[in-house]
Image: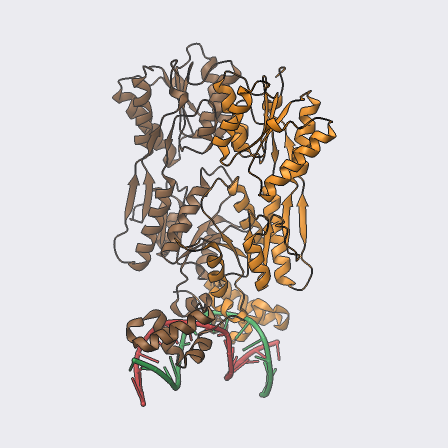
Chain colours: A brown, B orange, C green, D red
Amino acid sequence: MRQTIRDVSDRAGVSVATVSNVLNAPHLVAPLTRTKVMEAIDALGYRPNRAARSLQARKTQRIGYCLPNPGPQAALDVFFHQLVATATNHGFDLTLFAPRSGQDDLDAYREVIRAGDVDGFVLSETNYADPRVEMLSDLGFPFAAFGQANHPSPFPWVDVDGAAGLAEVVEHLAAKGHRRIALVAWPEGSESGDKRVEGFEQGMAAAELQVDPRLIKRVENGFLGGKTAGAELLDAVDPPTAIVTVQDELGFGAMVAMSERGLKPGADVAVTGFDDTPAAAYVWPGLTTVRQPFDEVAQALVNLLVDRLANPEGSPGSRMLVPRLIVRGSTAGTDR
Amino acid sequence: MRQTIRDVSDRAGVSVATVSNVLNAPHLVAPLTRTKVMEAIDALGYRPNRAARSLQARKTQRIGYCLPNPGPQAALDVFFHQLVATATNHGFDLTLFAPRSGQDDLDAYREVIRAGDVDGFVLSETNYADPRVEMLSDLGFPFAAFGQANHPSPFPWVDVDGAAGLAEVVEHLAAKGHRRIALVAWPEGSESGDKRVEGFEQGMAAAELQVDPRLIKRVENGFLGGKTAGAELLDAVDPPTAIVTVQDELGFGAMVAMSERGLKPGADVAVTGFDDTPAAAYVWPGLTTVRQPFDEVAQALVNLLVDRLANPEGSPGSRMLVPRLIVRGSTAGTDR
DNA sequence: TTGTAGGCGTTATCAA
DNA sequence: TTGATAACGCCTACAA
């Protein structure tokens, strides 16, 4: 049923080697033979078998991505789309896998490597001393990571300058006249979270504003955490006029805390998020947020990885992308 | 660097065939030999090469999924997670691909088939006379589809009873005393959309309510369409007291149209959505909606496909899942 | 410029 | 119960 190279060579009246050359080294084949072979290929709808090709080339033309425990991965779908689109342009596809139940994450990666399933990985949600980065670096197995993961030896990474994003948020709020600005962040220890907090502090310093420790909240869960932290901030004796958060979900939670108290987000108290998830445009008023360019991130990750695969000895590239402030009603002020 | 079966056989002092048998037909191997071989396997961290195995077995243990043009695919996140998790349980992984730029969708599928890339596909967002369903059915290539796609010959599908969902929405609203109930739907011609409209009509009939044609709006785009349609409905002479929509995004749009007019969703006018996207819980008030059990859908799709691969001649299975009404503030009424 | 042949790592067949 | 050996479909020397 499926065509092999032999079917093509028979039909074109040439050897299999010639067909292979037409496909992989056309310049070695006489023009006439070439067209003859191409016609046979078209007529039969022949495509080289991927498994056979992988076996012989010891390359798979596949990029692996491990889908860890389900969690609110912001804009996973635009990330995947661009990952796949870019991979496709390079002749790769994306292989999704997961740890088997009870299996350690790292073991899942190891298995994939040993089975020769993929040529390299894309990693996301990396953190300080990320074990995956360490393992893959040790193994010398190619990968590209979303996040810098402060690893000693260089590796290909793409990151979004979260600090710059939060500094810009604060600048925006300061320009609106806010002076008591609260922050809702994650617990310390996440690289991306900590950098956003730094950016907040830098922004406050730049605006010559005091960071009031009572206005800093650390919470785990996105929406619920935001709601709880927002409630505490709003119910305090001297509430803030603006609540900055490090994630849209936290911002949504804070907005709900306001609404529940009869306060109008944006008019009475400003709120901001981070990510620009679709929902940021759907809530009322729209959530001012920092847009992560997930499409560019995905594209850059694949490009860096493919570069590395083509040239394993070169020094690994990296890219720091700048996020963009998206201003919506949640920071409009009374005049909205 | 990577271990082969020969490395294992050398270390264990047996032939490669024996190692292969330990892996694939352990009962054929003497217990003593078996442990010897297993030890060698463990010591070397050997895993059979996927490409070689695929080549010989003419099976890939891969399920393909084509990521079409980016669009708001509701909850792609949880769908993928469960797809991959279930596939992993069956020893499969998920291969994501996309049409190359300018390439026809169907051609992308054809290429993957001819290259022997995957054993079967999972299809989502199918519609009446879906060309993919037709092509794959004609080819006899295995797949499982999210949606019934009214194809003459049977194939494995999973669907969510959208009509039942909308009927339940109407029942809920009628019980709250609503009599002028509007509907915001997509243009006719989408299978899932049309069924939801039918469900709306059935619900209205069951509640002995008139369907006022002026209260039926058809729009393309999710959020903006919902906003526009909501605006028209609210600005009409005799506005509805409830707006039912066939998608959360439409509902968010309608909520914003209300807010812009100083109306309180839930208190002044009720709104409902469909899907239970994460954002439905983040808006204020929360959006009453119909939850699609995407996790069950994904799981069932993979199970049906794997069944089919194991038993191509059996009659294809199918599953109709029942969605669940999630009541939130947007239909709470004045007492919220 | 084209064809022959060996090998990529596995599994299946068949002898021993 | 185990071990040679021949595929699986392709690519790449090397020979013609």
Q: Position of residue A251 (x, y in %)?
A: 44, 25
Report the side of B236 relative to A251 (left or right): right
Quadrant location, the C terminus of chain A: top left
Quadrant location, the N terminus of chain A: bottom right
Quarter holding residue B270: top right
Is B92 or B7 nearer to us in this picture? B92
Quarter holding residue B161: top right
Is A219 or A249 nearer to us in this picture? A249
Is B59 or B150 nearer to us in this picture? B150
Is A146 or A5 nearer to us in this picture? A5
Quarter holding residue B141: bottom right
Q: Position of residue B155 (x, y in %)?
A: 64, 56
Vertical placement of residue B77 versus A59, above or below: above
Task: Report whether residue A25 is seen.
Answer: yes
Report the side of B263 relative to A331 (left or right): right
Report the side of A103 relative to A272 (left or right): right
